[in-house]
């Protein structure tokens, strides 16, 4: 359904003929049909081009989680390397830990958004 | 792999390089009074030489420019002549009672140390900034 059909209605051919008590002058003041067409034409299509073939939403999410997990593991390794004297510099360990923390927060934000949209759907009146 | 703190690799390499620079300076200060090294000569002042380090593009959020880090190319010896000090009682004194001491100016070393420490601090500020920016960006989704 075109969301702009309600706006288009007032400039139906009836109106241009002066029906509904409108004079032709008033009808001319309304937005012409072809101008509205320009606005309405680029409708959004569900995009299939962005995600590569075979990549579902689930697998994308799974990759995010495993990336975060890898970062946590790397941070753990760096801290272990630092404390056991394996030659990992202090700043590298701290940066790895910080990266793990930020990416974890990103994952939590994604989870919050997902849950929020699910609850929004559940609240919807049928 | 997701890249949450972009531009951190170059900063990390700079932190490492500055740390090595500080180590070399501390070595210079510690050995300022050493008149005999294993080779029999007085200690020679050392200094670091930096060079750019082009890390490979890691994909993800990139604008086609590889991150340019920094690394210590080499640690070279300062070729200034030793300072001769009159100290006849010293074990390393020559026939005239002169001892060759390293020509290390402690003020120069301290100025270098301050410079290295401030550069380190500046790089830390970059890391802090990148972290704050990432967290602030995440707070877009909060309500």
Image (spheres, coloured by chain):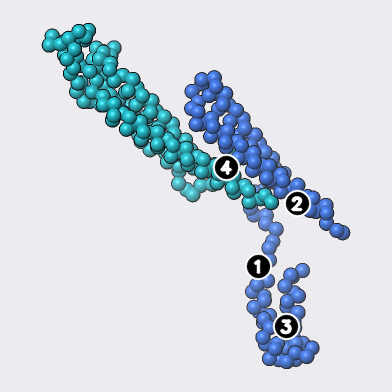
Q: CA distance from mark 2 to mark 3?
A: 38 Å
Q: Would you name the residue on which mark 3 appears?
A: A11
Circle 3 or circle 1, nearest the eye: 3
Q: CA distance from mark 1 to mark 2?
A: 26 Å
Going by the picture, which residue comes out furthest to the left?
B96
Q: Position of residue B101 (x, y in %)?
A: 22, 18
User: Could you tell me if residue B73 is visible in this image?
Assistant: no
Q: Would you name the residue on which mark 2 appears?
A: A117
For chain B, give the colour.
cyan
Residue at x 59% of width, y 41% of height: B2
First in sequence: mark 2 vs mark 3: 3
Left/right placement of residue B137 relative to residue A4 reads left
Q: Which chain contains the residue that carries disc 1?
A: A
Q: Would you name the residue on which mark 1 appears?
A: A42
Q: Residues within 10 Å of mark 1 (few under 14, many from 20)?
A: few
Q: Position of residue B3 (x, y in %)?
A: 56, 42
Left/right placement of residue B79 relative to residue B140 reads left
Q: Which mark is residue A7?
A: none
Q: Which chain contains the residue that carries disc 2?
A: A
Q: Would you name the residue on which mark 4 appears?
A: B4
């Amino acid at each position: 359904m075109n969301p702009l059909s309600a706006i288009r209605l007032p400039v139906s051919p009836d109106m241009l003929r002066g029906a509904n008590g409108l004079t032709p002058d008033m009808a001319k003041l309304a937005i012409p049909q072809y101008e509205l067409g320009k606005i309405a034409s680029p409708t959004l299509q569900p995009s299939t081009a962005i995600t590569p073939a075979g990549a579902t939403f689930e697998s994308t999410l799974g990759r995010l989680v495993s990336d975060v997990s890898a970062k946590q593991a790397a941070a753990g390794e760096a801290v272990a390397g630092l404390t056991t004297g394996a030659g990992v510099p202090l700043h590298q360990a701290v940066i790895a830990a910080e990266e793990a923390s930020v990416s974890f927060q990103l994952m939590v934000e994604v989870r919050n958004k997902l849950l929020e949209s699910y609850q929004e759907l559940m609240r919807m009146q049928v | 792999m997701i890249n949450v703190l972009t531009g951190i690799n170059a900063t990390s390499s700079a932190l490492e390089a500055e740390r090595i620079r500080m180590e070399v300076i501390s070595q210079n200060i510690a050995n300022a009074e050493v008149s005999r090294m294993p080779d029999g000569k007085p200690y020679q002042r050392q200094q670091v030489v930096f060079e750019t380090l082009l890390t490979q593009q890691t994909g993800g959020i990139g604008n086609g420019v590889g991150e340019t880090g920094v690394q210590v190319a080499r640690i070279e010896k300062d070729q200034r002549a030793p300072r001769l000090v009159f100290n006849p009682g010293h074990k390393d004194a020559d026939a005239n009672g002169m001892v060759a001491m390293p020509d290390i100016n402690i003020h120069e070393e301290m100025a270098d140390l301050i410079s290295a420490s401030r550069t380190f601090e500046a790089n830390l500020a970059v890391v802090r900034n990148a972290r704050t920016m990432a967290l602030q960006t995440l707070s877009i989704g909060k309500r």
